[in-house]
Amino acid sequence: MPNDAALYALSVDLGNQLLAAGLRVAVAESCTGGWLAKVITDVPGSSQWFEAGFVTYTNKAKRELLGVTQATLQEQGAVSEATVREMVAGTLHRTDADVAVAISGIAGPNGATPGKPVGMVCFAWGRGGAVIHCRTEYLSGDREAVRRQAVRIALQGLLDEFATQLA
């Protein structure tokens, strides 16, 4: 499990790459409750490459702030690749960011449903005009461990998904 120094190092790396490429990132979070935006903004000078962060913990917030459709939430649920895909699209539409990431999951200890256990976290990464990539992970540990791992995956995913574009 990464510690906060590891998350900070990933944020610094991401910031350096975004700054060099002249790009800005925005984030949409649910189960991480703003932790991703916090880790990013811990980096001095992040205002040069961090555009915005949305913490959309409820379905209503996902609909109203990011444009996630009611149909997606009813048919797929808040913790689904369809939802995080729409969260990324909404983030890119509502900000001037070039790149976005979204996270929605079940950090526990409660909230599991049939087929969606505690530790299930969905991620999406996108860039304006490009395909949105999604992934679901099944993370272990307590609530804090799941959330910390989700932040790491989101950061690493930005670096991995856009390595060729950010280099």
Image (cartoon, rainbow, N blue to C red):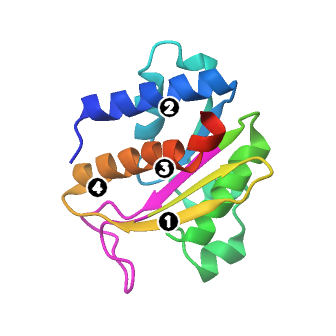
Which numbered disc, 1 or 2, marks the residue that appears first in the sequence? 2
Q: Which residues are drawn in magenta?
A: 100-121
The residue at which mark 2 appears reads as 14
Residue 118 in magenta? yes
Q: Residue furthest bottom?
A: 114
The residue at which mark 3 appears reads as 157
10 Å crowding of disc 2: few (<14), some (14-19), many (20+): many
Q: Give the number of the disc on residue 4.
A: none
Which numbered disc, 2 or 3, marks the residue that appears first in the sequence? 2
- Which quadrant of the structure image shows residue 51? top right
Residue at 40% x, 38% y is 35
Which numbered disc, 4 or 2, marks the residue that appears first in the sequence? 2
Q: Does dot 4 land on a helix, a strand or a loop?
A: helix
Residue 84 position in % (x across, y down): 59, 61
The residue at which mark 1 appears reads as 135
Q: Does dot 1 land on a helix, a strand or a loop?
A: strand
Q: Amino acid at mark 4?
A: Val
Q: Amino acid at mark 3?
A: Gly
CA distance separating discs 4 and 3: 16 Å
10 Å crowding of disc 4: few (<14), some (14-19), many (20+): many
Residue at 66% x, 51% y is 126
Q: Are marks 1 and 3 in contact (CB under 8 Å)?
A: yes
Which numbered disc, 1 or 3, marks the residue that appears first in the sequence? 1
Question: Can the viewer see residue 108 in this picture?
Answer: yes
Q: Amino acid at mark 1?
A: Arg
Residue at 66% x, 74% y is 72
CA distance separating discs 1 and 2: 19 Å
